[in-house]
Image: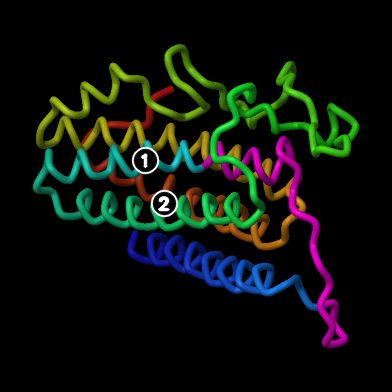
Protein backbone atom coordinates (compact mmCIF):
# COMPACT_ATOMS: atom_id res chain seq x y z
CA UNK A 1 0.00 0.00 0.00
CA UNK A 2 2.84 2.39 0.88
CA UNK A 3 4.60 1.63 -2.41
CA UNK A 4 1.43 2.30 -4.41
CA UNK A 5 0.78 5.57 -2.62
CA UNK A 6 4.40 6.71 -3.07
CA UNK A 7 4.17 6.00 -6.80
CA UNK A 8 0.99 8.05 -7.08
CA UNK A 9 2.57 11.00 -5.31
CA UNK A 10 5.71 10.80 -7.44
CA UNK A 11 3.72 10.81 -10.69
CA UNK A 12 1.80 13.91 -9.63
CA UNK A 13 4.96 15.70 -8.45
CA UNK A 14 6.80 15.07 -11.72
CA UNK A 15 3.81 16.23 -13.75
CA UNK A 16 3.49 19.39 -11.68
CA UNK A 17 7.20 20.20 -11.98
CA UNK A 18 7.11 19.73 -15.75
CA UNK A 19 3.95 21.80 -16.05
CA UNK A 20 5.38 24.65 -13.96
CA UNK A 21 8.53 24.76 -16.09
CA UNK A 22 6.53 24.75 -19.32
CA UNK A 23 4.17 27.43 -18.04
CA UNK A 24 7.10 29.69 -17.17
CA UNK A 25 8.57 29.09 -20.62
CA UNK A 26 5.27 30.00 -22.27
CA UNK A 27 4.94 33.14 -20.18
CA UNK A 28 8.48 34.08 -21.21
CA UNK A 29 7.58 34.06 -24.87
CA UNK A 30 7.35 30.49 -26.08
CA UNK A 31 9.11 27.15 -26.07
CA UNK A 32 12.54 26.40 -27.44
CA UNK A 33 12.70 24.65 -30.80
CA UNK A 34 15.94 22.81 -30.10
CA UNK A 35 18.45 25.30 -31.57
CA UNK A 36 18.37 27.87 -28.79
CA UNK A 37 15.73 30.04 -30.41
CA UNK A 38 12.20 30.58 -29.13
CA UNK A 39 8.99 30.33 -31.04
CA UNK A 40 5.73 31.94 -29.99
CA UNK A 41 2.90 29.49 -29.32
CA UNK A 42 -0.66 30.32 -30.26
CA UNK A 43 -3.05 30.33 -27.32
CA UNK A 44 -5.75 27.63 -27.41
CA UNK A 45 -9.19 28.64 -28.67
CA UNK A 46 -12.13 29.34 -26.37
CA UNK A 47 -13.79 25.97 -27.05
CA UNK A 48 -10.63 23.94 -27.58
CA UNK A 49 -9.98 20.71 -25.64
CA UNK A 50 -7.15 22.54 -23.84
CA UNK A 51 -9.45 25.26 -22.53
CA UNK A 52 -12.44 22.99 -21.98
CA UNK A 53 -10.42 20.51 -19.95
CA UNK A 54 -8.92 23.31 -17.85
CA UNK A 55 -12.36 24.70 -17.02
CA UNK A 56 -14.07 21.37 -16.39
CA UNK A 57 -11.25 19.77 -14.42
CA UNK A 58 -10.95 22.87 -12.23
CA UNK A 59 -14.61 22.38 -11.23
CA UNK A 60 -14.17 18.61 -10.87
CA UNK A 61 -11.12 19.07 -8.65
CA UNK A 62 -12.86 21.64 -6.46
CA UNK A 63 -15.44 19.08 -5.37
CA UNK A 64 -12.71 16.56 -4.52
CA UNK A 65 -11.02 19.19 -2.35
CA UNK A 66 -14.29 19.97 -0.57
CA UNK A 67 -15.11 16.29 0.08
CA UNK A 68 -11.61 15.69 1.40
CA UNK A 69 -11.85 18.51 3.91
CA UNK A 70 -15.28 17.28 5.00
CA UNK A 71 -14.09 13.75 5.79
CA UNK A 72 -11.07 15.03 7.73
CA UNK A 73 -13.55 16.49 10.20
CA UNK A 74 -15.75 13.38 10.31
CA UNK A 75 -13.18 10.70 11.23
CA UNK A 76 -10.10 10.20 13.37
CA UNK A 77 -8.75 7.39 11.17
CA UNK A 78 -5.23 8.52 10.20
CA UNK A 79 -4.90 6.62 6.89
CA UNK A 80 -8.14 8.17 5.60
CA UNK A 81 -7.25 11.60 6.94
CA UNK A 82 -3.80 11.39 5.34
CA UNK A 83 -5.26 10.32 1.99
CA UNK A 84 -7.84 13.10 2.15
CA UNK A 85 -5.19 15.70 2.95
CA UNK A 86 -2.98 14.60 0.06
CA UNK A 87 -5.87 14.54 -2.42
CA UNK A 88 -6.97 18.00 -1.29
CA UNK A 89 -3.45 19.40 -1.50
CA UNK A 90 -2.64 17.83 -4.87
CA UNK A 91 -5.91 18.71 -6.56
CA UNK A 92 -5.95 22.26 -5.17
CA UNK A 93 -2.48 22.79 -6.65
CA UNK A 94 -3.50 21.30 -9.98
CA UNK A 95 -6.66 23.40 -10.01
CA UNK A 96 -4.60 26.54 -9.49
CA UNK A 97 -2.39 25.56 -12.42
CA UNK A 98 -5.36 24.94 -14.72
CA UNK A 99 -6.91 28.29 -13.83
CA UNK A 100 -3.51 29.93 -14.24
CA UNK A 101 -3.26 28.60 -17.79
CA UNK A 102 -6.67 30.08 -18.61
CA UNK A 103 -5.41 33.44 -17.34
CA UNK A 104 -2.21 33.05 -19.35
CA UNK A 105 -4.25 32.32 -22.48
CA UNK A 106 -6.59 35.24 -21.84
CA UNK A 107 -9.61 32.93 -21.63
CA UNK A 108 -12.55 33.01 -19.20
CA UNK A 109 -12.89 30.46 -16.42
CA UNK A 110 -16.61 30.07 -17.13
CA UNK A 111 -18.35 30.06 -20.52
CA UNK A 112 -22.12 30.39 -20.22
CA UNK A 113 -23.00 28.51 -23.43
CA UNK A 114 -20.53 25.65 -22.91
CA UNK A 115 -22.12 22.41 -21.62
CA UNK A 116 -19.88 20.37 -19.31
CA UNK A 117 -17.62 17.96 -21.19
CA UNK A 118 -18.49 19.40 -24.62
CA UNK A 119 -14.79 19.38 -25.50
CA UNK A 120 -14.56 15.60 -25.21
CA UNK A 121 -14.30 13.81 -28.55
CA UNK A 122 -13.91 17.00 -30.58
CA UNK A 123 -10.83 15.73 -32.37
CA UNK A 124 -12.65 12.83 -34.02
CA UNK A 125 -16.29 13.91 -33.96
CA UNK A 126 -16.21 17.51 -35.10
CA UNK A 127 -13.45 17.63 -37.67
CA UNK A 128 -11.24 20.12 -35.86
CA UNK A 129 -11.86 23.72 -34.89
CA UNK A 130 -12.73 26.94 -36.64
CA UNK A 131 -10.71 30.13 -36.37
CA UNK A 132 -12.03 30.87 -32.88
CA UNK A 133 -11.19 27.41 -31.63
CA UNK A 134 -14.85 26.38 -31.60
CA UNK A 135 -15.15 22.62 -31.85
CA UNK A 136 -18.86 22.20 -31.32
CA UNK A 137 -20.96 21.36 -28.29
CA UNK A 138 -22.46 17.99 -29.12
CA UNK A 139 -21.57 15.12 -26.80
CA UNK A 140 -23.72 12.54 -28.52
CA UNK A 141 -22.21 9.07 -28.56
CA UNK A 142 -18.90 10.01 -27.00
CA UNK A 143 -17.22 7.17 -25.16
CA UNK A 144 -15.98 8.39 -21.78
CA UNK A 145 -14.40 5.13 -20.77
CA UNK A 146 -17.74 3.76 -19.59
CA UNK A 147 -18.09 6.59 -17.07
CA UNK A 148 -21.19 8.78 -17.32
CA UNK A 149 -22.65 11.54 -15.21
CA UNK A 150 -25.38 10.25 -12.91
CA UNK A 151 -28.64 12.19 -12.47
CA UNK A 152 -28.03 15.26 -10.34
CA UNK A 153 -24.27 15.32 -10.96
CA UNK A 154 -22.63 17.98 -13.10
CA UNK A 155 -19.94 15.74 -14.62
CA UNK A 156 -18.92 12.06 -14.59
CA UNK A 157 -17.78 10.92 -11.17
CA UNK A 158 -19.02 13.98 -9.34
CA UNK A 159 -21.21 13.55 -6.26
CA UNK A 160 -24.72 14.90 -6.05
CA UNK A 161 -25.90 17.42 -3.46
CA UNK A 162 -27.65 14.61 -1.62
CA UNK A 163 -24.47 12.53 -1.45
CA UNK A 164 -22.47 15.51 -0.20
CA UNK A 165 -25.09 16.05 2.51
CA UNK A 166 -24.82 12.39 3.53
CA UNK A 167 -21.04 12.68 3.78
CA UNK A 168 -21.34 15.79 5.92
CA UNK A 169 -23.70 14.00 8.30
CA UNK A 170 -21.77 10.72 8.56
CA UNK A 171 -19.15 9.92 11.21
CA UNK A 172 -16.41 7.39 11.84
CA UNK A 173 -16.41 4.27 9.68
CA UNK A 174 -19.56 5.34 7.83
CA UNK A 175 -17.87 8.59 6.79
CA UNK A 176 -14.70 6.74 5.77
CA UNK A 177 -16.53 4.21 3.60
CA UNK A 178 -18.76 6.81 1.94
CA UNK A 179 -15.81 9.10 1.25
CA UNK A 180 -13.76 6.28 -0.27
CA UNK A 181 -16.71 5.22 -2.42
CA UNK A 182 -17.47 8.77 -3.57
CA UNK A 183 -13.81 9.48 -4.25
CA UNK A 184 -13.48 6.24 -6.19
CA UNK A 185 -16.34 7.35 -8.45
CA UNK A 186 -14.77 10.81 -8.63
CA UNK A 187 -11.38 9.44 -9.68
CA UNK A 188 -12.92 7.21 -12.36
CA UNK A 189 -14.57 10.26 -13.90
CA UNK A 190 -11.39 12.28 -13.51
CA UNK A 191 -9.28 9.60 -15.19
CA UNK A 192 -11.63 9.53 -18.20
CA UNK A 193 -11.42 13.32 -18.49
CA UNK A 194 -7.63 13.38 -18.14
CA UNK A 195 -7.24 10.63 -20.73
CA UNK A 196 -9.30 12.79 -23.09
CA UNK A 197 -6.94 15.72 -22.60
CA UNK A 198 -3.83 13.56 -22.87
CA UNK A 199 -5.11 12.44 -26.28
CA UNK A 200 -6.55 15.73 -27.57
CA UNK A 201 -4.96 18.73 -25.86
CA UNK A 202 -2.28 20.49 -27.91
CA UNK A 203 -0.42 22.21 -25.05
CA UNK A 204 2.50 19.91 -24.10
CA UNK A 205 2.53 20.93 -20.44
CA UNK A 206 -1.21 20.37 -20.10
CA UNK A 207 -0.97 16.97 -21.76
CA UNK A 208 1.83 16.04 -19.36
CA UNK A 209 -0.21 17.17 -16.37
CA UNK A 210 -3.24 15.23 -17.61
CA UNK A 211 -1.16 12.06 -18.05
CA UNK A 212 0.22 12.54 -14.54
CA UNK A 213 -3.36 12.78 -13.25
CA UNK A 214 -4.24 9.51 -14.98
CA UNK A 215 -1.31 7.64 -13.45
CA UNK A 216 -1.71 9.09 -9.97
CA UNK A 217 -5.47 8.63 -9.76
CA UNK A 218 -5.29 5.08 -11.07
CA UNK A 219 -2.79 4.32 -8.29
CA UNK A 220 -5.10 5.93 -5.74
CA UNK A 221 -8.01 3.86 -7.06
CA UNK A 222 -6.05 0.72 -6.18
CA UNK A 223 -5.23 2.15 -2.77
CA UNK A 224 -8.85 3.10 -2.05
CA UNK A 225 -10.08 -0.34 -3.08
CA UNK A 226 -7.71 -1.85 -0.50
CA UNK A 227 -8.87 0.63 2.15
CA UNK A 228 -12.51 -0.20 1.46
CA UNK A 229 -11.76 -3.93 1.71
CA UNK A 230 -10.12 -3.36 5.08
CA UNK A 231 -13.39 -1.79 6.23
CA UNK A 232 -15.55 -4.62 4.93
CA UNK A 233 -16.85 -2.57 2.00
CA UNK A 234 -16.28 -2.22 -1.75
CA UNK A 235 -16.52 0.39 -4.50
CA UNK A 236 -20.03 1.10 -5.72
CA UNK A 237 -21.26 -0.25 -9.04
Question: Are the two marked residues, 1 and 2, in contact with CB atoms closer than 8 angstroms?
Answer: yes
Mark 2, residues whose alpha carbon is within 10 Å: few (<14), some, or many (≥20)?
A: many
Position of residue 41 measured from the top left corner of the image (x, y, whole percent): 79, 62
Compared to residue 78, the image places residue 107 above or below, namely above
Q: The N terminus is located in which quarter?
A: bottom left
Q: Distance between the residues labelled 1 and 2?
A: 7 Å
Mark 1, residues whose alpha carbon is within 10 Å: few (<14), some, or many (≥20)?
A: many
Position of residue 68 measured from the top left corner of the image (x, y, whole percent): 27, 43
Q: Is residue 164 magenta?
A: no
**Magenta stretch, residue numbers:** 33-57
Position of residue 62 measured from the top left corner of the image (x, y, whole percent): 39, 41
Residue 55 placement, left or right of 154: right
The residue lying toward the viewer, choosing from 132 and 34, is: 132
Q: Closer to the N terminus: mark 1 or mark 2?
A: 1
Q: Which residue lies furthest to the top in this view?
A: 151
Q: Which residue lies furthest to the front in this view?
A: 106
The residue lying toward the viewer, choosing from 110 and 173, is: 110
Residue 91 is marked as: 2
Compared to residue 35, the image places residue 2 above or below, namely above
> Which residue is found at the position 29% from the left and 21% from the top?
163
Residue 167 placement, left or right of 219: left
Residue receiving disc 1:
64
- Disc 2 is placed on an element classified as helix
Residue 208 placement, left or right of 157: right
Q: The C terminus is located in which quarter?
A: top left
Q: Does the magenta stretch include residue 56?
A: yes
Amino acid sequence: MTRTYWAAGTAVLLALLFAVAATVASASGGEGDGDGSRTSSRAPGLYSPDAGFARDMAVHHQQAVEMSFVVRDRTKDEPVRSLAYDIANTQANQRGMLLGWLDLWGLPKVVADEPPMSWMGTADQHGGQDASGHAGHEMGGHDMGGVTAKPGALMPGMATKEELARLGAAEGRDAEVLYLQLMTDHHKGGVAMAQGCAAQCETPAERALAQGMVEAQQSELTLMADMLKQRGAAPRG
